[in-house]
Image (spheres, rainbow, N blue to C red):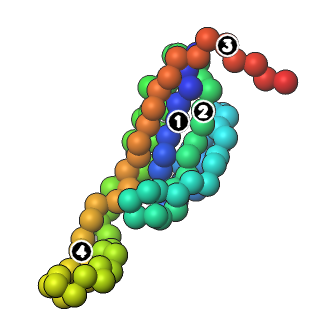
Amino acid sequence: MKLIIAIVQDKDSNRLSSQFIEANVRATKLSTTGGFLRSGNTTFMIGIDDDRVDEVLAMIKETSHAREQFMTPPVNLDVTMDGAAAYPVEVQVGGATVFVLPIEQFHQF
C-alpha cells in the first residue's frame, strides 16, 4: 500500500479528478496555495495498492502540464533600485510535484 501526494495546478485538477473517477481511484482533494507565486494549487491524497501506483502516476503525468506565465515581481521600495525590476517576468508554472510514501496500515471506516 502506498500514499501518493500529488500537488497540481488548479487548471489541471478537474481533468485529473475526472480521470481518477473513471479509473475508480479514490482521492481526497485539498485546495492549497503555492508559496512562490501564491497561486492556486490542488493537492490530491491517494491511498492505492502497490500494483496500481504506476497507473496513477501515468494519469498525473498525462494531465499535469507545465506552462509559461508572466508574473510581476514584488515592488521594492528602495529608491536606489533600478525601476526596471517592476516589469513582468516569464516563469514556468504547472506540472506536478508527487510524493510516493509507504503505508504500514490503511483503514476505511
Decide which of tag 2 and tag 4 comes sooner along the chain.
2
From the image, tell me which residue sits under label 2. Answer: 46
Give the residue type at disc 4: Val
Are the residues at dot 3 and dot 2 in contact (C-beta closer than 8 Å)?
Answer: no
Residue depth check, mark 2 versus mark 4: number of the one nearer the observer: 4
Q: Which mark is residue 43?
A: none
- Label 3 packing within 10 angstroms: few (<14), some (14-19), many (20+): few
Identify which residue is drawn at 27% across, 65% down: 91
Q: Secondary structure at mark 1?
A: strand
From the image, tell me which residue sits under label 1. Answer: 5
Which of the 4 quarters of the picture holds residue 15?
A: bottom right
Residue 3 drawn above or below residue 74: above
Give the residue type at disc 1: Ile
**Residue nearer the viewer, 107 or 51:** 107
- Label 1 packing within 10 angstroms: few (<14), some (14-19), many (20+): some
Give the residue type at disc 2: Ile
Q: Is residue 36 left or right of residue 42?
A: left
From the image, tell me which residue sits under label 3. Answer: 105
Q: Position of residue 10 (x, y in %)?
A: 52, 59
Q: Is residue 23 visible?
A: no
Decide which of tag 3 and tag 2 comes sooner along the chain.
2
Which of the 4 quarters of the picture holds residue 75?
A: bottom left
